[in-house]
Image (spheres, rainbow, N blue to C red):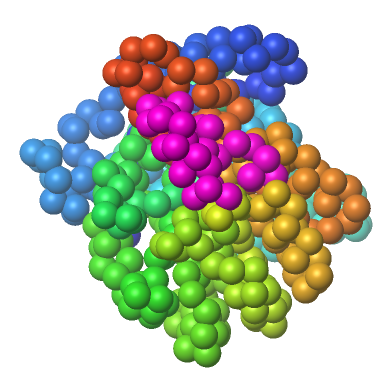
Amino acid sequence: MAELRFNLPWRRFEERRSSHSNFRTELTNLLSIFFLLVLLSPISESNQVLGFCSAGYGDLECGSSSSKLLIKGGIVVNAHHQEIADVYIEDGIIVSVQPHIKGNVLLNGGGLLAYKARVEEKKDSEMGDGNFNYELGQVRHVSELLNSYLQVGDDVTVLDATGKYVMPGGIDPHTHLAMEFMGTETIDDFFSGQAAALAGGTTMHIDFVIPVNGSLSAGFDSYKEKAKKSCMDYGFHMAITKWDDVVSREMEIMVKEKVSINSFKFFLAYKGSLMISDELLLHSFKKCKSLGALAMVHAENGDAVVEGQLRMIDLGITGPEGHALSRPPVLEGEATARAIRLANFVNTPLYVVHVMSIDAMEEIAKARKSGQRVIGEPVVSGLVLDDSGLWDPDFTIAAKQESLHISLFTFLRFCL
């Protein structure tokens, strides 16, 4: 698979326990720095980006470029700790994360020699802690091996990351690229959306396959075709929009035979389009349990949302503010609580997508505290935006606020 490589410095996004206004200020500063980094960071010296070339986009001159990269002196951040170290990468694969990897030293034709040998990482009790047996011979200290062998050739691109954070690429578990929905289609396809994601440091995403006329197989084939222009790693969840014996059998095929999809999303919203009933939700939960698959829900009370929309029309509220008024947080909270209780009844884990309100969050927190296996998916836009802009007396400004909410939702998902 072709890859895009964007060499961007990173700034850690610290969790703030301050006022809402301070959080917005921090986000604004972060976005400003992000855009500045994008403007200042070259894609490559020759502007040769393999992903763009293979997808046939733009006027870039295509050709070969170095596949070896050494990032020096950065603060490497992982899930469990951070340390100042160097990161050596070959062909998009992280080969080593160690202090003081020597760059620009040609050794036997270049390349990393330490990892050419088979390494037996088994402590030698007779030599004491910190020493290992290698097929290359016994080495008194690991540092001796590193100093002797962790040298890279002059064909390696070296980046100075001193004072900058170096973080693993992000994984976005919830995207909708080239999604056709209610007479519209999302503007980004599997190339443009992925290119934007890579620019922001997201290196993998999981998209949702939407069935074609209820058929999972047809939907999967459709999304395989859409994904042919991909320039980064991706995976699939599968949406379930109806229930019958055929769908039940196709779920087994997706999990066991065809593509190893093991997560299925059910909509409690979008009445008349994707929404399923509680009866079908129970059947689906039981099927997920039998397959060992993860059940996911979009939790809003679709019936009540339709009632809210009709109420807004009756009251003559047809502006952007009507969107928020027709679906207050209580409807997300109710649907979240209902899905949690039904999952508990079936005894299967549950993943609640894009949690946007305190009502829903509290239901998830209560279930988790009781020991139930429930995951709430946080969305940055749900933390930093509210509906105040929708009430601007200038319709154009208010409408743009709604558009900004959607755009920022997408941007933050991919880039932060």
Q: Is residue 258 left or right of residue 100?
A: left
Q: Is residue 352 magenta?
A: no
Residue 216 vertical position relative to residue 332 in the rendered view, above or below = below
**Residue 330, horizontal then vertical, whole percent:** 68, 40
Compared to residue 389, the image places residue 285 above or below, namely below
Q: Where residue 257 appears, x then y in whole percent?
A: 49, 86
**Residue drawn at the location 49% of the way across and 14% of the way down:** 28
Q: Residue at x 44, y 37 (%)?
A: 314
Q: How many marks?
A: 0
Q: Which residues are magenta?
A: 304-333
Q: Quadrant of residue 356?
A: top right
Q: Determine if residue 240 is in view.
A: yes
> Which residue, as the protein is rendered here, is positioned at the far front?
314
Whether residue 378 is visible, yes or no, is no
Q: Is residue 319 magenta?
A: yes
- Of 256 and 332, the residue lying toward us: 332
- In which quadrant is the N terminus drawn? bottom left
Q: Who's the residue at 75% across and 66% down the image?
A: 342
Q: Decide: is 90 above or below 216.
A: above
Residue 188 point in image, percent of width and height: 28, 45
- Is 144 in front, or is 30? 30
